[in-house]
């Protein structure tokens, strides 16, 4: 009749793995964050080639993309030389201050 006590122990064990899954994933490389609120553009004008693509080798200061804020186009430079590992935003996407834009490795 006391079989209910062992059933409670597995339920407590099931809670522990859920907290381990909630940890944020770490990205390799340096993350370039947006310095302002605005709209991202990956190329200098519609139909032009993008500033950079995933896998490109870049130099420090090279323009990665543009963030348009209040009708002003603000180039976002690479903080260091390296390779573009990820572009975390799409063309025409609105971004917030501090939002990750790209990963450089």
Image (cartoon, grey):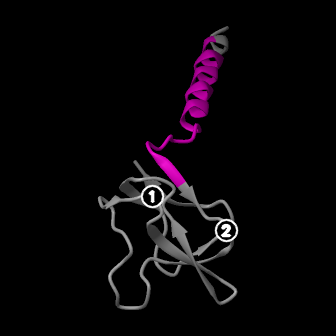
Nearer the camera: disc 2 or disc 1: 1
Mark 2 vs mark 1, CA separation in Å: 24 Å
User: Magenta residues?
Assistant: 6-31
Is 90 placed left or right of 57 in the picture?
right
Residue marked by disc 2: 96
By secondary structure, the bulk of the magenta-drawn segment is best described as helix
Q: From what the image shows, is residue 76 above or below residue 91?
A: above
Is 84 placed left or right of 1 in the picture?
left
Q: From what the image shows, is residue 27 above or below residue 78?
A: above
Percent of width and height locating residue 69: 66, 81
Percent of width and height locating residue 43: 42, 81
Percent of width and height locating residue 19: 61, 32
The part of the image, by quadrant, that contains residue 50 is bottom left
Q: Which of 33 and 92 is in front in this view?
A: 33
Q: State the residue at coordinates (62%, 28%).
A: 15
Q: What element carries label 2?
A: loop
- Residue ranking furthest to the top: 2
Q: State the residue at coordinates (69%, 65%).
A: 97
Q: Mark 2 vs mark 1: which is more N-terminal?
A: 1
Residue marked by disc 1: 60
Q: From what the image shows, is residue 40 above or below residue 64?
A: below
Magenta segment includes 79: no
């Amino acid at each position: 009749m006391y079989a209910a006590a062992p059933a409670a122990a597995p339920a407590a064990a099931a809670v522990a793995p859920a907290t381990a899954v909630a940890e944020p994933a770490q990205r390799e490389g340096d993350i370039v964050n947006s310095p302002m609120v605005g709209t991202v553009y990956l190329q200098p004008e519609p139909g032009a080639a993008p500033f950079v693509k995933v896998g490109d080798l870049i130099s420090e200061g090279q323009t990665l993309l543009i963030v348009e804020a209040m009708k002003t186009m603000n180039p976002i430079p690479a903080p260091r030389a390296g390779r573009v590992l990820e572009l975390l935003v799409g063309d025409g996407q609105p971004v917030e201050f501090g939002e990750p834009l790209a990963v450089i490795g």
